[in-house]
Image: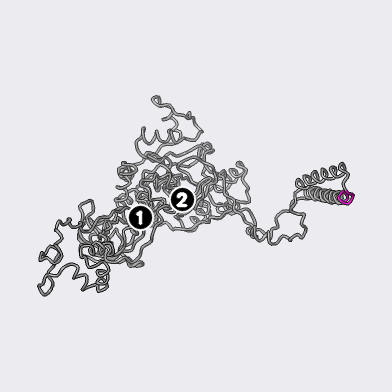
Amino acid sequence: MATDHQLFDEMPVNLSKYSKRVLLKTILDRADGGLGLVEQRVVVGGWVKSSREMRKDPPPPPTTTTQPPVGGGGGGDAKEDAGGKDVKCVEVFQSRFPFLRTIIKVFGGNIAHTKEKLESIVPKPQPSMISFLQISDGSSVVSLQIMVDSSIAPPSLLMPTGTCILAEGILQKPSLQGKHVIELKAEKLLHIGIVDQDRYPLSKKSLPLARLRNCAHFRPRTTTVASVMRVRNVLTQASHTFFQNQGFVHVEVPILTATDTDGFSEKFEVSTSSVSTKEQKREEPVSMDDTVNISLETVMLSIAEKSKKVEELKRTDSNKEALAAAVHDLQKTNALAAELEARLKSKSRSKPKSKSKSSEFFSNEAFLTSSGSLHLESCASALGNVYAFGPRFQADISESKKSLAESWMIETEIAFSELEDVMSCAEDFLKFVSDYVSENCYENLYFLSKRVDKTIIDRLRSMASTPFEKISYTTAVEVLEKVVDKTFETKIQWGAALTEEHESYLVDEFYKKPVIIYDHPQELKPFNVRINDDGKTVAAFDVIVPKVGVLIRGSQKEERLNHLSKRINELGLQKEQYEWYLDLRKQGTVKHSGFSVTFDVMVLFATGLNDVQDAVPFPRNHGKLHN
């Protein structure tokens, strides 16, 4: 397989087909760093990562020439014109700027005095500056240095971090010593996207990943997050390549579903009303009664005040007309209070109206799917080997750094396959993608190994070359029970789920390589996993890898109708939701197996990150939905 460097060295620097610019990776990711492209004219675009400015030419040294006396023959301030004659400085100004003759006359013809005045009138030329910009367009880890003269654009406009530029110029060797192998001398700026430095969040250097989550719409512009996104992209490509090479058919499974795939997960319910809240408000009749918005509490306070006023009028023996008006006002307020009380009693006695079926979009409850595996079984019954890649949703409130409310999953289903077959497929898949990303994304992995985790490249290569250890759940428990040099926070016993601490010990300390644990207790796995002959365990497996723990979960599905129906009844699931699923067992059933890969966690494994929120472009989690 050709490496990135070999491919780029053979490629000419062509324009990007859809933006008429050159991608920076075609320049910078060559083995020679782009030196072979010197003197080529290109158009590049990107965002400023860092910048600095320098004076183009050093200022001339101060002169000590003495001003010659007026009318003298000295040539200290004189220059030779085209005819070879000595001409005084002031005479030159007079010949080129006639209006200055008048100024000289006003000042009385004193040349020395006039020169001082001229210096205050004629502005001094500003020094020419050069901006050195490091820009990135998202295609490479490396930034390109661009040199821009201030005659093209002022440094203050270009230098703020985040400024977007599109520049045309000539590639050349760097004009300054440094880490850069090549730079672009800009001759023309085709676009400048300015930045408000006071509000742009990336102006500060080295923001921690946790703080970058608060500006998810800008964080891909950082080198670290951009590298993670490129690794994610290559992992996506590797996944599709593996399954396509193995003859799998890619299918899309529904995101909206009426079926609980696991039988025990918390689900996001989808609002199915076809009438929006605004429309409902518009349909409500508008009351012309001014009293509908008056609370009973307000009216009672008013009654107290009016009663007090009536009593005061009675005590002071005021005129009878004022007393009568106050009494009448109090009576009207008492009547209003009685009316409001009657309304509240009537409202409390009335039963809430149920939603009309005509206002529902679907005929039954709908949820965001937590897994597409059930629908994949339907496709596998016709297409053989299938896989899906898409978002899945869990409404569980979790503090785990490896779970999100919206996560991306790769799911497979293989017809005529049993447990041993699907475990081999899962192992081959992880070996393939680990090797693929190591070969095709080395620059990004190398950068992340320096910034995040220095072991990621070795870990990926080890994954690709080391055979996985396969043990039963019972064996795993026995190994953990014999541990004497370590105390686990959660005591291990058969029937309990293995914790991250247990899994980490097995992978990192005992076997020191990826481990596949199979034949788990029935209670720990979904309702549709095939029950083993012992009646206690099911044909399910977990693939546990270093750094992240469980990366793949899979199983052989229960193809026997009576066992599956019994399991649905035992868990108290709504059988009508699964009638279509049971039909697959009634009509041409087949043994089949599959697995699911938590793709976001696979990105964690490949990049060395610790929190899955940093492995996705826009994380969705409990209490957090900013974008």
Q: Residue at x 87, y 46 (%)?
A: 318
Element at label 2:
strand
Find residue 391 and report its horizontal and vertical position in percent.
Answer: 48, 53
Q: Nearer the viewer, residue 365 or 42?
A: 42
Query: Majority secondary structure of the magenta segment?
Result: helix
Residue at image x 47%, y 35%?
498
Give the camera-side residue of 89 and 540. Answer: 89
- Measured as percent of width and height from the top left, residue 37 is found at 21, 62
Residue 539 drawn above or below residue 343: above
Q: Can residue 289 be seen in this view?
A: yes
Q: Name the residue under label 1.
A: 160
Amino acid type at circle 1 is Pro
Q: Earlier in the sequence, mark 1 or mark 2?
A: 1
Identify the magenta region. 319-324
**Could you say where residue 378 lies in the image, as x and y percent from the top left?**
52, 55
**Residue, disc 2:** 409
Report helix, strand or loop for mark 1. Answer: loop
Dot label at residue 547: none
Q: What residue type is labelled 2?
A: Met
Asked if residue 125 is positioned above or below residue 315 in the image, the reply reads below
User: Image quadrant for the N terminus?
Assistant: bottom left
Q: Is residue 79 left or right of residue 233?
A: left
Instruction: Find out whether residue 364 is within the magenta segment.
Output: no
Furthest residue toward top = 484
Q: How far apart are marks 1 and 2 (CA)?
A: 39 Å
Q: Residues within 10 Å of mark 1 (few under 14, many from 20)?
A: many
Between 195 and 212, the one lying in front of the other is 195
Which numbered disc, 1 or 2, marks the residue closer to the eye?
1
